[in-house]
Amino acid sequence: MPSPSSRIANIIPSGKDGWEVHFDAMTRHQAGEDIIMLSVGDHDFDTPSETVEAAVKYVRGGFHHYVQLPGLPRLRAAMAKISTRSTGVATSADQVIATPGGQAALYSAVQATLDPGSHAIVVAPYYATYPGTFRAAGADFTVVETRAEDGFQPRRDAIEAALQPNTRAILINTPNNPTGAIYSRTSLEAIAAVCREYDLWLLSDEVYWTLGGGEYLSPRALPGMAERALVINSMSKSHGMTGWRIGWLTGPADLIGLIISLNLVSTYGLTDFVSRAAIEALENDWGVEKIAATYAERRHVVLDALRGTNGVSVRGSEGGMYVMLDIRAVEPDDEAFAWSLLNTEKVAVMPGSSFGDAAAGCIRISLCQPEEVLREAMARLRRHLATMSDRKAAE
């Protein structure tokens, strides 16, 4: 066949990506092996019943047709209201475009701000799709590693050191996947200062905005940032709607207007009945408080179960759906540790290095299991750590 475009061929380079542990564990789990899956961030509970019933109502009501490219007007208004409430920045519907999931919002933001050959900065650890999204735009990027010892907080000097003459944007994620870190006001003010000084776009992935353990601050709310911040959001985590594919992008109205043209030649809008169910979920906050409380309690369960464990330090882990453990004192090779935990104790976790060098020597624990399962998994983890520590002491 003819050669594919380099744009497509280079989105995901070949080679190991660190996810082998998860895929192996999933295969064995589906085959009936007693493995506790703590390696993936998908809710273990269903979408709130009110949202499901709303979707059924609209399917039966004949809402099966095309909708406006930027989203139904009432949907955009509901998203703008949520953005206003959560960030404190007055947001109008023309500053929002509804997208099929947060990833589509991220893709739109990157396509809208970066030309082929331009440059971006990505603060790590980062969500797995970030590099491929920049490659799909033909853009270059530099990864700026945070440090586990700093709680994975970004540092201005490291970001400035990565700037190039063609840098156009910085991408951050807070509350963070995979670390659970919530960027402090000090960290965000420093990043905002860099964006203002060097006239950069800030792409802020805030899909975990309801799952924070402390103050939620969107950098869009900082002085001079509303005109240069694009906020990626989603109903997947906040409203328990991962498979429904509903997200949105908030930014300056003029840029959102241009992104609508991108939507014309890409997704061509959303699903009618799903959009209408999403409107009701947003307007009524269905599931939001319960989901946030569930993950907050699960985080406490995991951290309490690990309290006093020798050789383990908690890094980040203030919000989101994950806990990040620094296990370098026991085993510097996080992938080797994840494999040994899987094979010895039947617990699947993600090696931190799967998300960049910043999290090397750490493991990511997903909180997407009931409390009793998490307690059992932590008992197995503690047993494994004790065995490895004893073995290390005997050497």
Image (cartoon, rainbow, N blue to C red):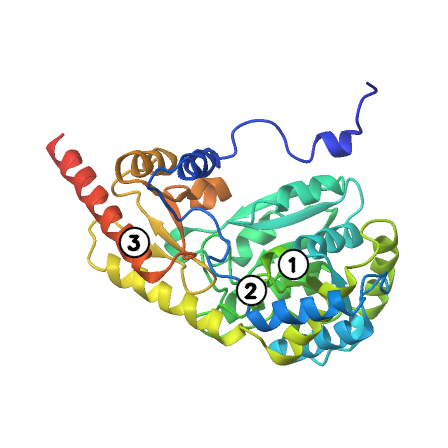
Please, which residue is most extreme toward the left here? 394
Tell me what residue is drawn at x 82 percent, y 49 percent.
Answer: 266
Picture quarter with the C terminus: top left
| Circles 2, 1 touching at the beta carbon (< 8 Å) | yes
Tell me what residue is drawn at x 56 percent, y 70 percent.
Answer: 49
The residue under label 1 is which amino acid type?
Trp
Q: Residues within 10 Å of mark 3 (few under 14, many from 20)?
A: some
Looking at the image, residue 389 sits to the left or right of residue 362; the answer is left
Q: Residues within 10 Å of mark 1 (few under 14, many from 20)?
A: some
Residue 145 pos. (x, y %): 50, 47
The residue under label 2 is 47
The local secondary structure at tag 1 comes to helix
Along the line of sight, which residue is nearer the eye, 240 or 303?
A: 240
Front label number (3 vs 1): 1
Looking at the image, residue 331 sits to the left or right of residue 245; the answer is left
Residue 109 pos. (x, y %): 74, 56
Along the line of sight, which residue is nearer the eye, 66 or 147?
A: 66
Looking at marks 2 and 1 on the same chain, the residue that comes earlier in the sequence is marked by: 2
Tell me the distance, in whole angstroms, between the alpha carbons under discs 2 and 1. 9 Å
The local secondary structure at tag 2 comes to loop
The residue under label 2 is which amino acid type?
Thr
Image disc number at residue 244: 1
The residue under label 3 is 313
Residue 265 pos. (x, y %): 87, 49
Q: Is residue 225 visible?
A: no
Residue 237 pos. (x, y %): 55, 62
Tell me the distance, in whole angstroms, between the alpha carbons under discs 3 and 1. 36 Å
Tell me the distance, in whole angstroms, between the alpha carbons under discs 2 and 3. 34 Å
Note whether 166 is above or below 214 in the view shown: above
The residue under label 3 is which amino acid type?
Ser
Q: Residues within 10 Å of mark 2 (few under 14, many from 20)?
A: some
